[in-house]
Amino acid sequence: MKAIEEHNEVCRLITEIGAYRKLANPTITGYEFQCIQLVSLVCPKYLILPYLRETAKEMKTRKPDSKPTWRCKVVLYGSENDDPEFTKLIESCGALVVADRHCYGSLPGREEIVVADGQSPLDAITRHYLDTSMCPRFMPQDEMRNRKQQLADIAKEYKADGIIIEQNKFCEYWSYERTIDTIIMPRDFGIPVCSIEKEYINGASGQLRTRFQAFIESVEIKKIQEGK
């Protein structure tokens, strides 16, 4: 129960810090947030909690850049991504990553575990992850449709202009999901998508940079055409 309490406090703090990404001019970058999120996954909770509390307090008074350095906002969506340098590459091209809907991200991933009266802690933990996981290994039609709607809702909530879908090679579940979403998100929700397959180790940064820059330019053109 103590471990669950510590976990839940980490979740509350990560959620609080991540909420600043919803601002019109966010006060935290995707790279900064991913570093915090990854540390919170691997560091013992009692060690990281004091620093998370300090960061959450500092965020209350952190000021945004006087002039935004980004050209558009994107949701980073897909399979395993434990490399903050990949997020930094995206942001160096001009797209601010405002939401992290991937295997090591916080959406989902930072929901608190609720232990019902009379329920064992282990049962609460296992049921929590079965209920909240949005992994594409869950393949019933209702689950798949729910994931598409949730992704569209995240893009709207975080004021994203587009979605970057990344899939590591040989991850078959995300290969199916990426292929489907590349069609459905623009067609059914009107959200631009940049779809890429990448190595686990980012060794093709030049090619990826070209893809990201072209996608950002297309998003900018779309915004001009829509008068935004």
Image (tube, rainbow, N blue to C red):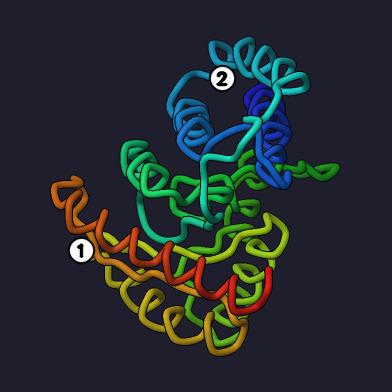
Q: Residues within 10 Å of mark 1 (few under 14, many from 20)?
A: some
Residue type pointed to by label 2? Lys
Disc 1 target residue: 169
User: Looking at the picture, how far across and down is residue 219, in whole percent?
Assistant: 49, 69
Q: Residue 146: which quarter of the image?
A: bottom right
Q: Is residue 35 left or right of residue 89?
A: right
Task: From the viewer's side, name the closer residue of 202 and 8.
Answer: 202
Q: Is residue 169 left or right of residue 134?
A: left
Q: Secondary structure at mark 1?
A: loop
Disc 2 target residue: 45
Quarter of the C terminus within the rendering: bottom right
Note whether 132 is above or below 60 in the view shown: below
Residue at x-position 28% and y-position 72%? 172
Q: Is residue 168 left or right of residue 220?
A: left
Task: From the viewer's side, name the closer residue of 10 and 1.
Answer: 10
User: Looking at the picture, how far across and down is residue 103, in whole percent?
Assistant: 44, 52
Residue at x-position 35% and y-position 62%? 166
Residue at x-position 65% and y-position 69%? 150
